[in-house]
Amino acid sequence: MSGNTGAPGPDLRQAFEAPPGRDEAVGLEVEVGLIHSGSRNNASYPQALAFLVDIVRHFDGEPLLDGANLVGVGLGDGGAFTLETGGALEYSSPPFPTVAAAVSNAHRRLEMAACVGASHGLVLFTGGITPFVSAAGIAWNPKPRVRIMREYFRGLGRDGAHADEVMGLILSAQTSLDYTDTDDLMTKLRLLVRASPVVAALFVNSPIAARQQTGALSRRMQYWRCFDPSRCGVLGFALDPGAGVEDLIDWAASLPMIYRVVAGDHVAAPPVSFRHAVERGFGDGTSPTSADWALHLSQVWPHVRVRHTLETRLADAPPWPSFGAGAALWAGLAYDPDARKTANDLLSGLSAAEIDRACVDVAVKGLSAMIGPYLVQDVARELLRLSRNGLHTRVLAGKEAPEALALLDPIDEVCDTMQTFADHALDAWNRGEQHFLSTFSIPVD
């Protein structure tokens, strides 16, 4: 396909081709609230800026700029700290060959960052949502794309009703998994799409929003349903055993970009599908490039996002001591062939509608929800068994460290007792805001 300049269009398939000989590594993205310990508001940009300047010095990092604004710190090993749109802090790890190494790295880096934060009167808060402020109190950072995105979502009406909360308040702990070729991509994607609501039930952890008990176990999951549903949710096409990368491309290319980068500046993209832009151009004499395609793929947020890796996105982040559990669960299921096949077979009868309905149910009921004809707790128990077996097999093969198995213990307990992280959060909240903040903050030695 080509645009109106006569230049060839980007190779859309190339973004999903694994490099030859790729190993199955694990990466983590951990979003934590950056909260002022006194007011309990999100850190303002000047407060976050002072913190980031200190992070640069402490980690001997490279300042990451958006225009003239400092918005992150690049680290020598490929990891990074970045300031999210509403002031949260994200740590993105480099890929590691084992879950244990990835978790250890993130654990060490974030605890060091918490020590830096303490010197600025800031705490690093873990969980599914920053609970102390409403959307009206979000401390938006000065990234140019923030204004463009907020205007875009406001234009969606009801479908974008909770965009500010999603952009400015929610937190997560995402796992990035590798695929070795396009067939492996689709097999793993199918599993991750099917299992995501069940895994999310093990991690529900956002029952408080704007200082109110919401009646939900995951207010975060509810917010996502009003954040442009066309870009989010269940990738239903992936459930078809015959689905391939072309279906993934068709889905993404049917959506418009939200913003582009032109001459170094973020600008609103025209309201045309990416496919239309490839065939006819953007209307300003330019046509999409491979960089535009990569940027577009960062502007979709389904439960499992595919770029150069598979990113799991649905579940809330757990409390700090348990933050590695999600990565361990996903790696045990996805990276062991027997566990992957058995789990896919177990969930093969689920439809996209049943998976979507389970997400609605899980947000309120957690493990007591249903997914298709099954009780989520029963499916979760089986997925945990398969994941533990998968991790154990990898340990025996020298592909994983033995300590990875213990990372599953907290969610085994959740499944057995039916006491979710959200239940513990409600108990902590009822003891007072200061107790709640202390309970869910990264400790400072």
Image (spheres, helix red, strand yellow):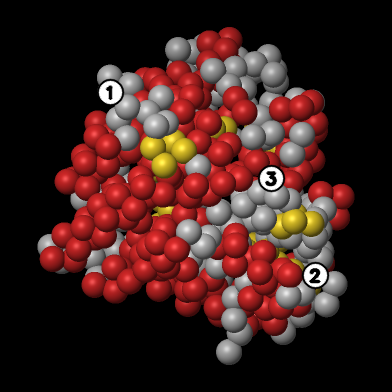
Above or below 51: residue 383? above
Specify which label sits upstream in the sequence, 1 or 3: 3
Disc 2 on helix, strand or loop?
Answer: loop
Q: Which tag, 2 or 1, sits closer to the chain's start?
A: 2
In the rendered structure, which disc, 3 or 2, sits on the residue that comes first in sequence? 2
Q: Amino acid at mark 1?
A: Pro
- Return the x and y of residue 282 as percentages of the image width and height: 64, 18
Q: Residue at x 48, y 49 (%)?
A: 367
CB contact under 8 Å: marks 1 and 3: no
Q: Which residue is mark 3?
A: 166
Which numbered tag is attached to residue 241? 1
Amino acid type, label 3:
Val
- How far apart marks 2 and 1 lie (CA) works out to 48 Å
The quadrant holding residue 212 is bottom right
The kind of residue on which mark 2 rests is: Arg
Residue furthest left as drawn: 397
Residue occupying the point 50% across, 36% down: 358
| Percent position of residue 253, x then y | 51, 21
Q: Position of residue 319 (x, y in %)?
A: 55, 67
Marker count (numbered): 3
**Secondary element type, mark 3:** helix
